[in-house]
Image (spheres, rainbow, N blue to C red):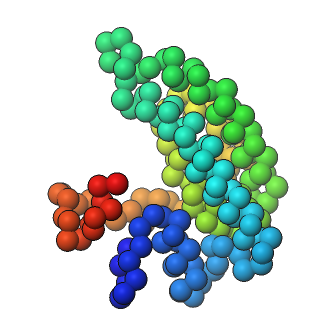
Amino acid sequence: MRRGDVELFESKAIATYIDRTFEGPMLIPADAYGAARVEQWVSVINTTIEPTWVRYFRAHVFPKGRDGAPDRAVIEEQLGPMSDQIGVLDEAVGQTGFLAGSAFTLADITLFPILHYLHQFPESLEMVKRAEGLEAYYHIMPNGRASSPPRRRRWEPERNGPWALM
């Protein structure tokens, strides 16, 4: 992200900058406890939930099974942890309708893209649909396609910067 003399990469840093720079509803609450709850969820999503779900996604998207089939061993290995994580998330959003507190926050923004991908594969879709609170939460979240940037046709180092290859 570039704005004047400010250059940032990494979505968490960019979101924090935008939240503190521009007017509008806060994505990270101003109070210490509210901010800590958002940070807690962002951290657990990035360090625990996302790695589990990404292993599951990769087994479907980049199949290494016989005849190009999804890697069932990897998928089966992730289902238990995913089920536990979905249960925790279901309970969390069931309290207020949001992940961290009673308003839309950066925690919701962090969870939504990977929750979206759970709806793309059969085992995870079934799990989420059984988690009624999480399924309802998913359907009230803003539509990610409305905020997606246009796709670039090629890498442009002058626009993407040195971190584009990270």
Could you tell me residue 75's position as x and y percent? 53, 24
The answer to which quarter of the image holds residue 39 is bottom right
Q: Is residue 161 above or below residue 19?
A: above
The residue located at (42%, 21%) in the rendering is 70
Q: Is residue 119 above or below residue 76?
A: below
- Please tell me whether residue 94 is drawn above or below residue 107 in the rendered image: above
Residue 85 screen position, x and y as percent: 69, 39
Counting from the top left corner in percent of width and height, residue 138 is at: 61, 51
Instruction: Give the residue drawn at x 77%, y 70%.
Output: 34
User: What quarter of the picture does the C terminus occupy?
Assistant: bottom left
- Horizontally, residue 98 falls left or right of residue 57, namely right
- 142 and 49: which one is in front? 49
Looking at the rendered structure, the number of numbered marks drawn on it comes to 0
**Which of the pair 23/135 is nearer the observer?**
23
Q: Is residue 143 visible?
A: yes
Query: Is residue 20 rendered to the left or right of residue 87?
Result: left
Q: Nearer the viewer, residue 86 or 44?
A: 44
- Residue 46: percent from the left, percent from the top? 58, 51
Name the residue rendered at 53%, 65% in the picture.
12
Q: Is 31 positioned to the left or the right of 144 in the image? A: right
Query: Can residue 139 be seen at all in this image of the molecule?
Result: no
Q: Residue furthest top?
A: 66
**Picture quarter containing residue 145?**
bottom left
Q: Quadrant of the N terminus?
A: bottom left
